[in-house]
Image (cartoon, coloured by chain):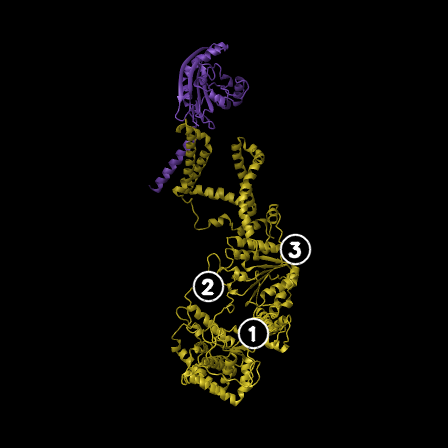
Amino acid sequence: MPSRSEKRAARRARDGREPQQDRQAGPAEQRTRKPLALWDRLKFVALLALLWLVLVWSDMANDPIIGFADAVRQQLTAARWVLILLGAELVRQLHFLVAEHWPGYYRLWSHGVFGRADRATHQMSDWTRFRLSRALKWLLAIAILAVLLGRAFHTSPGNALAEAPAKFLHILPLLLYVIAIISLGILQFVGIFWFMSKGGVDVYYPNDITTRFSDVWGQDHVLERVQENMLFLDDPESIEEKGGYVPGGILLWGPPGTGKTLMAEAVAGETGKPYVFVDPGAFINMFFGVGILKVKSLFRRLRRLAVRYGGVIVFFDEADALGNRGGGVGQGGGVGHGPVSPSDACHGFSYLSPNAQSALMADALKSKAAADPRPPTRHRQMVPGMGMGGGGMGTLQALLTELSGLKKPRGFFNRIVRRTLGMRPKPPPKYRILVMMATNLPSALDEALLRPGRLDRVYRVGYPSKDGRRRTYEGYFSKVSNDLSADQIEHLATITPYATGATIKDLVNESLIVALRDGRTTITWTDVLRAKLLKSVGPSEGVEYIERERHAVALHEACHAVVSYLVQKRNVIDTATIQKGADYLGFVKPIPIEEQFTSWRDEYEADAMVSLASLVGEQMFFDGDSSSGVSGDLQNATTIALAMEGLWGMGGQYGSYGVTRAPQGAHPVVDGNDRNVLETALGRRAEAHLASLAERTRTLLAEHRANVLSVSHALELHKTISGQDVTAIIQGGQGPLVDGRPYKTPEFAATLESYHQQVLAAHHGGDGSDGSLPLPVPAAGPVELDPVTAMKPLSTEPGTGQ
Amino acid sequence: MGWRNIHRVTGAAIAAAVSLSACSVAGHYTYVTDSGDNAYFKVPPTWKPVDQNRLAAVQAQLLGGSPAGPAGGTLTWSRAYDAAARPSAGHIFAATGQPVAYASVQAMSVTQRAGLSFDSMRNLLLPVTPAARQAAKKAGAPFSGFQSIGDQVITTHDGVRGVTELFGYVIGGVPEIFDQTVLTNSATTKLYLLLVQCDQSCFVAHRAQIGTVVRSFTVRGS
C-alpha cells in the first residue's frame, strides 16, 4: 500500500508538477530575470501618473480659485491611493530591476519565496485551490463594493453594506420600471420570432392515424426492418438490458411514390404513439435564427410527447429540404434523373435492356452537362445563406445538435439550482423518439445527419417486387368493381416492372375513368390496357402522316419490333406505336421478363442489333435509301459498341478505357467528348463489331421480310399495338388487339408486298403519285385501339341538359 | 542612448518619484467649496472649521429658530472657519481676537427677489446705510460707533453682482471690524454671504490674510 508521500508524489506527477530540483536540472534555466522592455517598465507608472494629473486637472476645473500648486498639494492628500499604487509599482519595478542584475536576489524570490508559496498552495488539490481563489475573489469584490457604496452613501463601508439592501428596495420600483420598458422593446422581437417559429409541424395523436402495415404493399423487406425498430420503440428494455441501445432514426430513400410516407404513417398507426409530421417547408425561413428556434421548439414538443406517451415518431418528409453544408452523402445517383432523353430521334432507347438504358442514360446526362453552358447544378445550388436551397442558416446544425443532445441534463432548476446546491443534475428521462426521414435525393443530405446515433438505419425503398406489385394491384383493384382474373393481375404486374404504389393507384384510377367513359362501372382487362397505354404513350398529338411517310415510320418501328422479338430473349415487347409524340415519331418498348442484375455480351449485341435494325431495314426496304430518323439508333448502337470494346471486355481487348482519362479529367469513351474516338483503334474495332452486327441484322430482316411488312401494316392500321399483338402477327395467332392469322395467308402477304412496292415507287417519285395510297385491309379487321378515343371526355348522363 | 543609460534614467526617475511621494503634502490654503451652488473661497490652513452642528445651533439662535437665512431666504449651505486655537461657533457675530469667517448661501423666494437691492445687501446683517442705522437707532438696537471703511459694488461678466462692505461697530465696548461680501447670481435666485470679522487690532494684524480670504470669494454665475 503506498504511503501518503508516495501518493502525493504520484499526484504531483499526474498534475505535471514535478519537484523543483527536477526542473532546475533543465539546461535552459535562467540565472537572472529576463529584462523588461522600457515601455513595459514604465507603462503602469505613466498610467498612474497620468491618472493623478487628470485628478489635479479635474480639481482645478471644479474650483475656479485654486491654482496648480494648490491643486497638486490638495491631490497629494485626496488622491493618495493613486500615489500609493504608484509607489507600489515603483517598488515592483525596482524589484524587477534588481532581479535582472543580481542572480542571488532573483533566485531568492523565484525559488525561495514564490517557489515555496507555490509548493505550499499546490499541496491543495486543484479543486480546493479553485474554490479558495473563487472565495477570495468574491471577498475582494464585496470589499470594493463596500468601499464604493460607503463613498456613495457618505458612510463607512460596513454600514454601507448593511444599508445596501434597504437602498436597493428603495430603488426597486424604478428598477422594475426600467426593466419593464426594456422588456417591452425586447418582447416585440420575441413575439415576432415566437410567431414565426410556429407552423410547419403537425401532431397526430394515436387514434388519428388509421394506416397500418397491411396497407403497405410490395416493400416487405423494408417493412420487416422498420417493424424491428418498432419493437424496440415499444419495448426498449429488450435491447437496453442486453447492453445495446434503441436505434434512434431511420432514413427511407428511394424513387418518388414508392410508399415512404405511407410506411412512416403505418409505423405511427401501428405503435399507437403520437406522430409528428414536419413539413418540408418548415425550415425555410426569412430571418436568421427562426429555423433554429423551430428546431428547438420542435424537439421540446417531441420530448414532452415522448414522456407523456412513452414514445413519439417524428417524420421529416423530403428531408433533402434540410440542406447540407457541403459534400453530400454520396449514396450514388440513379434516382430522380428527370426527363433526360438520350436522343431526340425517333424513339429514344426504349427498346433496350434496362442496364443498357442505364449506361446510355449516364452517357446522355454527361453529354447534356457538357453541352450546357451553365455551371454544373452542384454549383448553381449553392445559394448564399440557404445551404443547398434548404433550411440553412444554422437550422441543420441545430437539428444535428438536438439529435445528439437528447441524453444531456436539461432544465434551469436541474442544471443550475441543483448544481448550486451541490447536487448532481438528474439525468434526463429516456426520450423514446424515433426520427424518420424520407427523401428521394439522398445525395443531398448532410453526411453528419446519417452517422450512427442520429439516423442509424438507412433503407432504400425501391421499386416494388413483382409480388409486391401484384399485391398492390390486388389491393387497389379490391376497392373498385372489376372482372379481372388472378392471371390478368399477375400479367399486369409483370408488364409494369417499375410501377410504384403511386403509379399503380393512378393506373387503377385511370382504368376506372376509361370504364366510366364507356358507361360502365366495372373495370375490364381492355380498360386496364387502354389506361396503361394512355399512361405510357400519353395522348397522341393527333398528327396524321401522309401515307408513304406513315409506311416508312411503320417499317422503321416494325424492323425494331421484329429484331427485338427475334434476338432479345430476356425481354418481351410491351408496346409498339407510330403515334407521334412530343419528341419521337414512334417507339418499340420492351420490358424485362424477370428482374436481372447483370447483362451479358449477347444481350448487348442484341440491343445493338435492335438499334441497327432501323437503318438496315430502311436500306433494305428502300433500295439502299435511309432516313435521318436513325440518328438516335446509331448513337445508341455506337455507345454500346464502344463500351463493349473499351469498358466491358466484350471485344478483343482486356484493358479497360475506364481507367484512362483525358488531361482535363474528362473521359473520352465514357463521356463521349473525344470526337476522334472513332478514328482510334478502339473506334475501328467498335465499327467492325457494328458492321458484323448490322450484317447479322440484315440477314434476319431478309429472312423475316414478310413479318416486318405485316407488323408495319398493323402499326399503320392501328397506330399502337401491344407486344402480344406483335407476337401474334409473327406467329400467326390471335393477339389481344390484332388477329395475326390473316397475315400468314400468302394472298395478304402478296398484297402487303405490293402495297410496299407502290409506296416505294411513290418514294422514288416514279408514278407521279401525290402520296395518297389506300391501305389494304385484311378480311377480318380487329378492334382499333386509339388513345385519342380513350381520351375523349366522359359522356354526360342523359337528361342533365348538358 | 544605450541600454545602461536607459537603466540609469529609469533608476533616477524611480528615485525621484519615490522622493516626491514621500515629501510633505501640507497645503498653503484650505479650499472651501459649495459646488452645488457654485460658491468658492479659501482660508489659511491655520483656520479651522467650526463644527457644523454647533454652527447650525448658533444660526437657529440668531435667526429665531427658523431655517431662514439672514435675508429671510432658506439656508442651503453654510460654513464657518475660525483662526482661534479652539474654533467655536460662539465667535461668530461676537467680538473676538482672532479672525472668523462665515459663509452662507440662501435660496430666495420671488417676493424676496423683488425686494433685493444693493442697500438691502449692505444691511443684510447689520445696519450700514444711514436710513437703516436711523431706523435701528429708533428701534433701540444696541449698535454704536459705526464706521464705514470701504464700500464697493461688484459686477462680473457672467451676471453675478453685489457689494462688499468694510465697516466697524463697537460691540460690548470693543471696536469690531466686519468685512462683508454679499452677492447674488445672475438669476437672482440665491444670495451669497461671506463675513470675515475680528476686533480692530486683530483686523490690522491679519489684514493680509483677511484680504486674501475675501478676495478669493467667488461665485460662478448660473
Task: Please give the residue where the numbered disc 1 appears in the rendered image.
Answer: A532
Where on the picture, by quarter, is residue A597? Answer: bottom right
Chain at numbered mark 1:
A
Chain at numbered mark 3:
A
On the same chain: label 2 and label 1? yes
Question: Does residue A496 appear in the picture of this structure?
Answer: no
Question: Does residue A401 appear in the picture of this structure?
Answer: yes
Q: Nearer the viewer, mark 2 or mark 1?
A: 1
Task: Return the residue nearer the eye: A5 or A731.
Answer: A731
Above or below: residue A450 compared with residue A536: above
Question: Regarding mark 3 in the picture, which secondary structure is present there?
Answer: helix
Chain at numbered mark 2:
A
Measure how far apart labels 3 and 1 are at the Cα level: 49 Å
Residue A386: x and y in percent read 48, 57
Q: Chain B appears in which tint?
A: purple
Q: Give the residue type at disc 1.
A: Lys
Task: Please give the residue where the numbered disc 3 appears in the rendered image.
Answer: A308
Query: If the image is split into quadrants, where does the C terminus of chain A sit?
Result: bottom right
Above or below: residue A274 compared with residue B61: below
Residue A296: x and y in percent read 57, 54
Task: Please give the residue where the numbered disc 2 appears in the rendered image.
Answer: A378
Residue at x 54% of width, y 58% of height: A281
In-image side of B73 versus B212 (left or right): right
Shown in yellow, the chain is: A
